[in-house]
Image (cartoon, grey):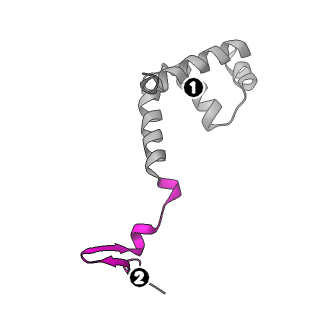
Amino acid sequence: PLSIYTPIYNNGNDEIYLIDQIGDEDDSEDKRVLKMTIEQGMKRLNERERDIINKRYFLDKTQMEIADEIGISQAQVSRLEKAALKMIFSDFSN
């Protein structure tokens, strides 16, 4: 077995170690930025909008299921969801 600190490339003073080449797909820079964006965007929403987004994207509920739970139509859930997503990602639309 190799140490993760084993040099795998050396060009004078520039060494690249094995650990430098190991990626962590679950913790990529893009995913961290997206997570931070969603967290900040969720803070902009009111309680009802947060509830809808949470149920839709984190609890995998359908718009119909959410509509039945909170007592509004599926079309209303769709409009609220669309507006909430627009607000969450508003920084990217400029």
Q: SS class of the residue under badge 2?
A: loop
- The reply to whether the magenta stretch includes residue 60 is no
Q: SS class of the residue under badge 1?
A: helix
Q: Name the disc covering residue 3, or none.
A: 2
Give, as a single range, the part of the protein colored magenta.
Answer: 4-27
Residue drawn 75% across the image and 22% down it = 64
Nearer to the camera, 77 or 82: 82
Q: Is residue 4 visible?
A: yes
Disc 1 to disc 2: CB gap under 8 Å: no
Give the mark nearest the N terminus, 1 or 2: 2
**On screen, 29 above or below 69?**
below
Instruction: Give the alpha-carbon distance from disc 1 to disc 2, as whole Å.
Output: 47 Å
Q: Is residue 10 left or right of residue 46?
A: left
Residue drawn 55% across the image and 24% down it = 85
Q: Is residue 72 visible?
A: no
Circle 1: residue type: Asp
What residue is disc 1 on? 51
